[in-house]
Image (cartoon, rainbow, N blue to C red):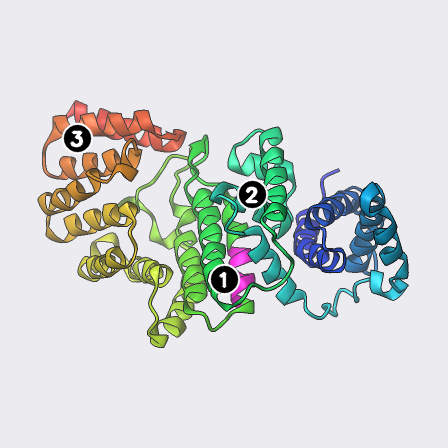
Amino acid sequence: MTAPQPMEDLLRELAPQVLALLTRRYGHFDLAEEAVQEALLAAATQWPDQGLPDNPPGWITTVATRRMTDLLRSEQARRRREQQEAFRALPADLLSPAADVPPAGDSDDTLLLLFLCCHPALNPPAQVALTLRAVGGLTTAEIARALLLPEATLAQRITRAKKRILEAGGRFRMPDDRDRVRRLDVVLHVLYLIFNEGYTATAGESLHRGELCTEAIRLARMVHRLLPDVPEVSGLLAEMLLTDARRPARTGPDGELVPLAEQDRGRWSRAMIDEGIALLTAALPRRRPGPYQLQAAIAAVHAEAGRFEDTDWAQIVALYQVLDRLADNPVVTLNRAVAVAMLSGPAAGLAVLETVARDQRMAGHHRLHAVRGHLLEEAGEKTAAIAEYRTAARLTTSLPERRYLLTRAARLDLR
């Protein structure tokens, strides 16, 4: 039986708390994660029929602890030591406080979990999967659906990630100052990747994966609560909010892609825009601008324009120029080319685009051809634009993007 949405939210909130508690106590991240997942599954199965327990955190912790003890006992080499440690624990230590009294250290433990899941020994896909599983509380099946992967493949990826962390000497403790700064960059990048995959899915029938956007924002809020004075943390959350505010207007009645210039801005979420701008306004005066703050500032300029025609393209170009110098990212230059074209004409945009075309990281990327097609269309070069649109459509694995690109090509062909 599927748990109702509020219960799903509660389970996802409890997952990292209980996982952190078990990992801190027993030191076996992989076994603790398995125990927590089984406890969550038991809750999702039993609570809808039996009702919510008086102490949900305590219920999950008790079930997970029992399962953790079973898993530890099954390890022959460590059976005696783990059994002794389990039975030495006072009964009160095996229970979380009441739901309205958060256990001490929970917030710090959640951040430690994020740092652990974003261990530099893992590649980005593994970091994303493990973060969604351990900190997001999503099941393997949910993550597999969200990332459009077979469940068996995703399970293997998570298993390898946990093994890799152990082999690399990952421990449930805060990294030293230097490693913490580096690891925080990885944490923010992983959340950024999760959000981007949700906002524009790289493959499949849907343009969006709304559950990934929601989860990325939830996790970013968590990090912001823990590190409210770090400007780039505020910048990332602001960027997510300002960007996701546009999501309701990005698709039409049949799920078709609606470009920014044609969106009904009345459908944008004003609450998310206001919150994003407030976060950005508080972060920028600290004079430590980073990529996420700059991207949030660009999104804010779009959000503040009542109509597409009112967009302050000069300001956007200036922000992209700073961002381009700060981050070696060809996608940033690609976006700058579009902004330059809006400000100075398609020829100027095409000139910027040529610098991107020479970057091997963009070889075979559909967005390069899609942007070139758009700028060529604006320049009146119909035949070349059609060819670029069709090339982009062939390269993309997103069906809504493919339909949009082919539609653009077909409209030009009829003129």
**Residue corresponding to mark 1:** 179
Q: What numbered label is drawn on residue 60?
A: none
User: Of the residues under marks 3 and 2, which one precedes in the sequence?
Assistant: 2
Residue 110 place in picture, x, y as percent? 62, 60
**Type of amino acid at the residue the image marks with label 2:** Ala
**Camera sees residue 108:** yes
The residue sitting at 21% across, 60% down in the picture is 312
- Residue occupying image coordinates x 30% and y 59%: 298
Location of the N terminus (image quadrant): top right
User: Alpha-carbon neighbours of circle 1 within 10 Å: few (<14), some, or many (≥20)?
Assistant: few
Which residue is label 3 attached to? 385
**Of the residues under marks 2 and 1, which one precedes in the sequence?**
2
Give the CA separation, mark 3 to mark 1. Answer: 47 Å
Q: Nearer the viewer, residue 342 or 306?
A: 342
* Residue tagged 2: 129
Q: Secondary structure at mark 1?
A: helix
Q: Amino acid at mark 1?
A: Asp
Cα distance in 3D space between marks 3 and 2? 38 Å
* Between marks 3 and 2 in the image, the one whose residue lies nearer the viewer: 2
